[in-house]
Amino acid sequence: MSHHYTTRLHAAIQSKGTPALVGLDPRWDQLPPDVLAHARELHDDPVAQAAAAFEEFCVRLIDVVAPLVPAVKPQSAFFEEWGPDGCLALARVIRYARQQGLIVICDAKRGDIGTTAEAYARGYLAGFDPLCAHWQADALTVNPYLGRDTLEPFLRVAKERGAGIYVLVKTSNPGSASLQDRTADGTTIYHHVAQMVEELSLETEENGYGIAGAVVGATYPRELSELRLAMPHVPLLVPGYGSQGGAAADVAPAFDCNGLGAIINNSRGINFAYRAAPFAEQFGSRQWEAAAEAATRQMIADLANHTPAGKPAG
């Protein structure tokens, strides 16, 4: 089996029959009552409570989605907010997800120069072998603002270890236009970044795709379509589906003719499905895991019906 990140990712997508990616975004004020109660039984310290609750919530969510999807994306900020206890919880969550056979994309948006960038890369990017890095991630989101030379250390480590990176190109937040849509030399900043990422991915291409990926939001479907054409060798990570307003039809242009080349993230819509219609009425907080499963299956079916990306699992 190839150790190449995108080859491994595509194999996982084909095995599960879906490009659905479940974000792990634990938020204290939205966690299910039983998870909160158990954490309070275990610890008196509020910080220890939060870390324990986040770990239990994510582990139980992983148990729900691991049979259904190829990958998960823990958001490091929610864990880091709680200091060392939260970081230990994140490490355990990543380790558990990999033990369940999932691809893990750590959403930490790191970016720096020289040896600092290399230290981030070596700390996060384990790639094919989880034991190659302490954080054990298959892939990492990366900020390109400091320039191409800040991405190269991440690429070197990723290539060595069978890992990947996802560079922020056109993000899903409404304010992204304030910088990313500005023009320089006759084209937008995000197009300049896209060209750079395409060049980097061509250097590491296998089976049509490299290991330098791009984050492109579902909330900008026209730009997503343009960027797919501009970056034919780049695997895409597409946030913004679901709670942020992106629909399955909006993400359809992210895929190639074989239904590969992209993975579509849904975080809040699955994590906290038990709090929103129609799952709140059907399941309630006592069956939050069943609500998360139903929301995941709904997403899988939605993507299958409106994109070239496979059929529902199960």
Image: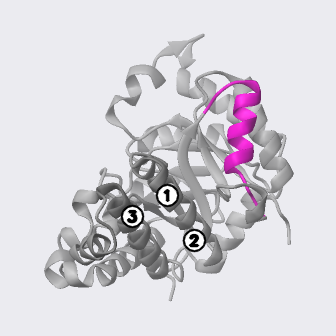
Residue that label 1 marks: 74
Residue 10 in the image, given as x and y percentages of width and height: 69, 66
Q: Is residue 185 one of those drawn in magenta?
A: no
**Residue nearest the viewer, comparing 175 with 117:** 117
Residue that label 2 marks: 97
Q: At x 60% / y 10%, what residue is drawn?
A: 185
Q: At x 61% / y 29%, what residue is drawn?
A: 144
From this viewpoint, is residue 259 visible? no
Residue that label 3 marks: 54
In screen coordinates, is 87 left or right of 29? right
Q: Which quadrant holds residue 117?
A: top right
Residue 276 in the image, given as x and y percentages of width and height: 19, 68
Q: Residues within 10 Å of mark 2 (few under 14, many from 20)?
A: many
Residue reaching furthest to the front:
44
> Element under label 2?
helix
Vertical arrangement, residue 216 with respect to residue 300, above or below: above
> Element under label 1?
strand
